[in-house]
Amino acid sequence: MGYQNLHIDISDHVATLWLNRPEKRNALSEDIWLDIPKAMADLDSDESIRVVVLAGRGPSFCVGIDIELLMTLSPTGASQAAANMDLYQTIKKLQSTANSFANSPKPVIASIQGHCLGGGIDLITGADIRVASADALFSIRETKMGLVADTGTLQRLPAILGSGVVAEMAYTGGDYDAEWAKSHGLVNEVFADQESLAEGTRVLARTIAANSPLAVQGIKKVFAATEGMNVEQALDYAAQWNASFLISNDLMESINAFLEKRDPDYTGT
């Protein structure tokens, strides 16, 4: 499927989903918001893909929602109630964009360079892993625009950073650099420049893709399902999961590869 401002590269079981609007620093136009869930649905259904990388073309990962789109979001309708409902439904539709990363059965890595502002934060909080180049800059920029972030940041970021840190970011709308992001756990690794970021992301993605997709996707499922459970409930869920999926061709392939002193060739079955 073709997209106006997205591009997909696939290699070695890794799909890179590019925000492809570099001349606008990957500002999130309406088509990007709506096309990302469609693209993720396609990638989710492709069994050959084991890892998804979210990246941005050009000097910036994403500067947030396109101002031109924001100007079209004024409520319209026959009544105030109808106008409010129309806007509510539009916001819910935009929320599905970051949700598509969080809800994907496959691990998603956000590879971040330059600006990651506003809606860009929403996108990366839906990812499982985040890495950045040293020039990355993070901001909940909606505050500076007189808005409350509403497409995932305030809901997912506290679990990553802690509520107090997110409160500071959100209340101030300030700019936070890559080293700050790493020290607070927003990103796993900071690379010296964009070239080394690209290479580091490739290595990480291929390392994950070399593992059994049944195991990797099972880990993501268990993470999501046990969030909010106590330890006993979470252990019981994990036991039920492995009772259903432990015995697999991938497990047998792992054992045989170990005995034969070779790399395993997983099929995801």
Image (tube, helix red, strand yellow):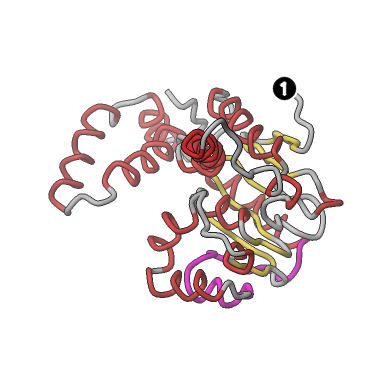
Residue 159: quadrant of the picture? bottom left
- Identify the residue at horizontal 54%, vertical 76% (top origin): 172
Please tell me which residue lies in front, 261 or 103: 103
Indicate whether residue 177 is drawn in magenta.
yes
- Identify the residue at horizontal 19%, vertical 38% (top origin): 239
Q: How many marks?
A: 1
Task: Using residue 222 as the reference point, say whether residue 193 is left or right of it.
Answer: right
Query: Mark 1, residues whose alpha carbon is within 10 Å: few (<14), some, or many (≥20)?
Result: few
Indicate whether residue 87 is drawn in magenta.
no
Q: Which residue lies furthest to the left in this view?
A: 232
Circle 1: residue type: Met
Question: Residue 94, how many percent across, how many down?
Answer: 56, 40
Residue 182: quadrant of the picture? bottom right
Can the viewer see residue 100? no
Can the viewer see residue 5? yes
Task: Using residue 105 as the reference point, say whether residue 42 is left or right of it.
Answer: right
- Identify the residue at horizontal 73%, vertical 50% (top origin): 66
Which quadrant would the C terminus be assigned to in this image? top left
Task: Using residue 7 as the reference point, say whether residue 175 is left or right of it.
Answer: left
Residue 197: quadrant of the picture? bottom right
As drawn, 184 above or below 82: below
Question: Residue 261, how many percent across, how many down?
Answer: 47, 40
Residue range highlighted in magenta: 176-195
Please tell me which residue lies in front, 216 or 119: 119
Question: Residue 34, how many percent across, how many down?
Answer: 64, 33
State the residue position of label 1: 1
- Identify the residue at horizontal 52%, vertical 34% (top origin): 79
